[in-house]
Image (spheres, rainbow, N blue to C red):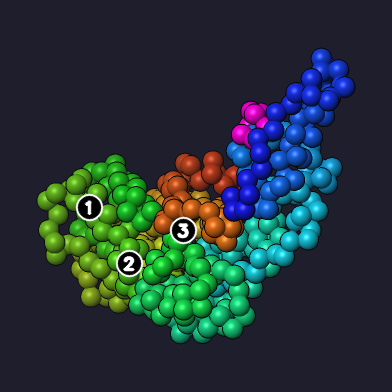
Amino acid sequence: MAGSKPKRISSNPDAGSKLEMGSKENRSVVRACDILKCFQNAKDPLGLAEVADLTALSKPTAYRILSTLVTEGMIERLAKNTYAPAFLSAKKKAYRIGFASQSEEFAFSRMVSESIQTSAYDARIDLLILNNRYSAAAAVRNAELFVREHVDLVIEFQTSQERATTVSSRLVDASIPIIAIEIPHPSATFFGANNQRAGTIAGKALAHACQERWKGHFDELVLLELPAAGPLVHSRLTSLVTEVRRAFPEIAPDRIRYINGNGRSDDSMEAMRRYLRRGTRQSILLGAINDPSCLGALRAMEEAGRGSDCLAVSHNGSLEARMELRRPGSSLIGSVAYFPEQYGEAVIRLALDKLQGKTVPAASFIKHELLTRETVDTFYPHDSILTEHQSDFLLFSRH
């Protein structure tokens, strides 16, 4: 915490308190007063752990009393387990943060954006939102606009590793701190996927499905890649290959094929169409950099009448992939979930910590889980509220 640290508070019934301390209600009042005293000399918000330490209360007790004080308007909850007195937060200037979204094209990107917007609103942050439109040039222009707007911090979500240095340099030169989502940027705090771990999960799932359904026999391992995202994101696929090779060490190098799907459904579908036209091998294990690439490739397989010739895994766990997993007869056996709906709370908390001068880790990662036909309803039980019309749209037209 920046600024002077408040002194430790301890309730002492012999030091001026005339309350009967045998009363549970009176003890609660004294504890609430102790908590309010913590904020008198604090120039910055206090976390739950700090309040518990300063008052010598347990965290559950401090949390319960803080929640009551929030309900009664005495304390403001700025973020998860972060509090300030109501009069201070009302007077304090709100932070202005720039958020460059990846694109509105993908469900995953939209969910990340919605999550960040919701968490920024809850934290009373003034959020300036720009759309990178899946374009490196747009990302650079947006960075320059953030500089002109004098934002306090930028949350950057753009795909091109090649332009990451340019984007960062614009912001660093203006002394604007950066949090980079998914793609590392120089001088930025990273938040996003543990790509190597996610690839390992996908590879194990694909190898297991091949052994279980095809008794370990397949002709090719085809990988839909996204070169523009750089080697860190590509490690999703290299880790997948490692696991498949571990399960099937006899696989020859010429049976492993990389195809550039550009991370998009339509591009991946067209790339897979071309591949199928010149290929002769039948059974294919398919690994894709993300859900749009995977679903596009599966559309091409089905269009060619070869849907049953494929077993596929993908990344993101987006709504489209979850609906595909539920579709009878789908070749998609799993999608590694990245839980974009959780990004906002974590990213905004990192942003506030950076702006308040607190130490933050250089990189923070989401915890991944494998979504399958059997587990998808456990992780996302409310997907079923979609109407039949919405479901048909999200599953993509196959006509």
Could you tell me which secondary element the residue under label 1 belongs to?
A: helix
371 w.r.t. 90: above or below: above
Q: Residue at x 62, y 80 (%)?
A: 149
The reply to whether residue 343 is visible in this rendering is no
Q: Residue at x 58, y 58 (%)?
A: 356
Task: Give the residue number, with chain letter if any, for mark 2.
Answer: 224
Give the mark, 3 or 2, whose residue is nearer the N terminus.
3
Pinpoint residue 101: horizontal percent, then vertical percent: 55, 71
Could you tell me which secondary element the residue under label 2 belongs to?
A: strand
Could you tell me which secondary element the residue under label 3 belongs to?
A: strand
- Looking at the image, do the residues carrying marks 1 and 3 touch, with CB atoms under 8 Å apart? no
Give the mark, 1 or 2, whose residue is nearer the N terminus.
2
Cα separation between marks 3 and 2: 24 Å
- Looking at the image, do the residues carrying marks 1 and 2 touch, with CB atoms under 8 Å apart? no
338 w.r.t. 9: above or below: below
Q: Which mark is residue 384?
A: none
Q: Nearer the viewer, residue 394 or 170?
A: 170
Q: Amino acid at mark 1?
A: Thr
Q: Nearer the viewer, residue 150 or 41?
A: 41
Q: Nearer the viewer, mark 1 or mark 2?
A: 1
Q: Is residue 270 magenta?
A: no
Give the mark, 1 or 3, whose residue is nearer the N terminus.
3
Cα separation between marks 1 and 2: 16 Å
Local packing at callout 1 (Cα closer than 10 Å; few below 14, some 14-19, many 20+) is some
Q: Amino acid at mark 2?
A: Leu
The reply to whether residue 362 is visible in this rendering is yes
Q: Is residue 54 magenta?
A: yes
56 w.r.t. 378: above or below: above
Task: Give the residue number, with chain letter if any, for mark 3.
Answer: 191
Q: Amino acid at mark 3?
A: Phe
The part of the chain drawn in magenta is 53-59
Residue 143 appears left or right of 220? right
